[in-house]
Image: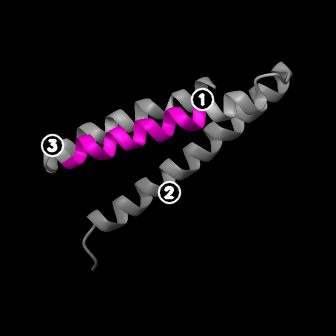
Amino acid sequence: MVFIAEWGDRTQIAMIGLHATLPLVPVMIGSTIAFGLLTLSAVLLGRLIGDQTLSEKTVKGICALSFAIFAVLAIHDSMLAHEVALPAH
């Protein structure tokens, strides 16, 4: 559940970045919808697995896999951004 709740941090950073370049009202509306969906997903997942017992090994494995996927995505995005930033010769 903490992992899903942490998506909110990422949404806040995106919201601040969008507000720097876009009008306030659409950013606020979009952010409100995003936070609502984030909260809804956390509640629904909590109800789904709330009564189940997960081993510590399973939780650590899921966390490790998630962070590995995020690392690969971040590296991929940075490589794409680097390619766009470099002028073609």
Please say if 17 is above or below 56: below
Give me the C-alpha separation between circle 3 and circle 2: 30 Å
Instruction: Of the two numbered discs 2 and 1 on the same chain, state the one appearing first in sequence.
Output: 1
Decide whether the magenta segment is chiefly helix, strand or loop: helix
Give me the C-alpha separation between circle 2 and circle 1: 22 Å
In this figure, which residue is indicated by the disc labeled 2? 76
Q: On the image, which quarter does residue 77 sit in? A: bottom left
In this figure, which residue is indicated by the disc labeled 1? 3
Q: Range of the magenta residues?
A: 26-42
Provide residue 36's location: percent of width, then percent of height.
44, 37
Give the left or right position of residue 47, taking residue 22 as reference. Answer: right
Give me the C-alpha separation between circle 1 and circle 3: 28 Å
Which disc, if any, is residue 24?
Answer: 3
Q: Secondary structure at mark 3?
A: helix
Provide residue 31's location: percent of width, then percent of height.
33, 41
Of the residues shown, which amino acid type is indicated by label 3? Leu
